[in-house]
Image (cartoon, grey):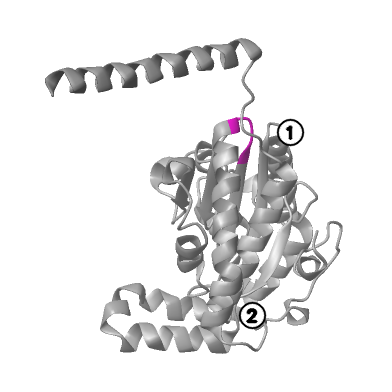
């Protein structure tokens, strides 16, 4: 991994991390437009090529999970980072509050259904990690149809183990997972909420529940720290991305996705000698067709 990216990766086996040790604001002090053109646009082109190879190869898949506090920029990161790739090879799945049918199944049921197929890039806007974040802060298992004996002090440790095993299972079946926590400061979240209130075209993005969740900021930071330490693994690492500047977050996410795809090394399918010989035949047929068309045009003249 590039040295500049290593500092954002949560190493496997950490007993504890403190989010205070990770910046929420980062990036060179140069004009945003200049940097966007210089580094973000070339990344988009590289991503297009790698995604096309992944799609053509049809042997591996990539799952990208985005988690963050409200207003951290998950939607815009998806929009900008993956704007140039072929939509046929990419599926975005937003995970909201589970419905009654989903609550009647294990919490990974709806997740597994949305895992990308081979050849595809799948993006989870929120993910199975809601079940060790929101569910933990709000004690949701106590209100769900789960046997009481299973809702004990060890439930979160069991879920961490279950999630790690699930992501290992995906890796062993050709589906790579990378996970991004968009690390937003409380001050920047406040400013973004204010913009949502002040700008009419952004009013629809604001919800009173955003303020209710904001009051639980410290609780969320604590459960994020626990989750990041216990579920960042070699096969499915977490990256803590500074998110106060959206373009910096987009750039870092694009760099890590590109590096992951390069490591996966997808290749265009190689034709057999027999198939190549047939292509030569097909080429001759098409060239003869062109000659016939020219002859017909001459006759008409």
Location of residue 227 (image quadrant): bottom right
Q: Tell which of 154 and 43 is nearer to you.
A: 43
Q: Is residue 59 magenta?
A: yes
Where does label 2 land, which residue?
A: 218
Q: Tell which of 269 and 118 is nearer to you.
A: 269
Considering the image in quadrants, where does the N terminus appear? bottom right
Q: Residue at x 49, y 73 (%)?
A: 70
Q: Residue at x 42, y 46 (%)?
A: 87
Up-down relation of residue 236 to residue 247 (above or below): above
Mark number displayed over residue 172: 1
Q: Tell which of 51 and 128 is nearer to you.
A: 51
**Is label 2 or label 1 in front?**
1
Residue 64 drawn at (x, y percent): 59, 52
Q: Residue at x 49, y 87 (%)?
A: 190
Q: Residue at x 46, y 55 (%)?
A: 84
Side (left or right) of 196 relative to 98: left
Q: Earlier in the sequence, mark 2 or mark 1?
A: 1
Residue 139 in view, yes or no: no
Q: Tell which of 58 and 130 is nearer to you.
A: 58
Q: Secondary structure at mark 1?
A: loop
């Amino acid at each position: 991994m590039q040295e500049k990216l290593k500092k954002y990766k949560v190493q496997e086996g950490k007993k504890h991390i403190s989010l205070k040790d990770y910046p929420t604001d980062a990036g060179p002090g140069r004009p945003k437009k200049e940097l966007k053109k210089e580094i973000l646009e070339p990344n988009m082109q590289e991503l297009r090529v790698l995604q096309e190879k992944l799609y053509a190869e049809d042997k591996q898949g990539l799952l990208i999970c985005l988690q963050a506090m409200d207003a951290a920029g998950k939607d815009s990161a998806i929009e900008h980072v993956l704007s140039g790739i072929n939509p046929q090879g990419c599926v975005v799945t937003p995970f909201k509050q589970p419905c009654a049918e989903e609550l009647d199944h294990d919490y990974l049921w709806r997740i597994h259904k949305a895992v990308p197929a081979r050849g595809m890039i799948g993006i989870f806007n929120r993910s199975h990690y809601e079940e060790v974040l929101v569910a933990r802060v709000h004690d949701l298992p106590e209100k769900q149809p789960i046997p009481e004996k299973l809702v004990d002090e060890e439930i979160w440790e069991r879920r961490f183990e279950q999630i790690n095993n699930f992501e290992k299972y995906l890796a062993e079946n050709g589906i790579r997972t990378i996970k991004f926590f968009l690390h937003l400061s409380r001050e920047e979240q406040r400013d973004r909420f204010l913009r949502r209130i002040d700008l009419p075209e952004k009013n629809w993005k604001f919800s009173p529940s955003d303020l209710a969740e904001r009051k639980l900021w410290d609780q969320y930071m604590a459960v994020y720290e626990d989750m990041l330490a216990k579920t960042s693994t070699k096969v499915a690492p977490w990256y803590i991305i500074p998110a106060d500047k959206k373009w910096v977050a987009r750039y870092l996410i694009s760099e890590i996705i590109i590096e992951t795809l390069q490591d996966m090394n997808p290749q265009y399918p190689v034709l057999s000698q027999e198939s190549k010989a047939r292509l030569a035949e097909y080429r001759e047929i098409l060239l003869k067709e062109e000659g016939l068309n020219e002859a017909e045009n001459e006759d008409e003249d």
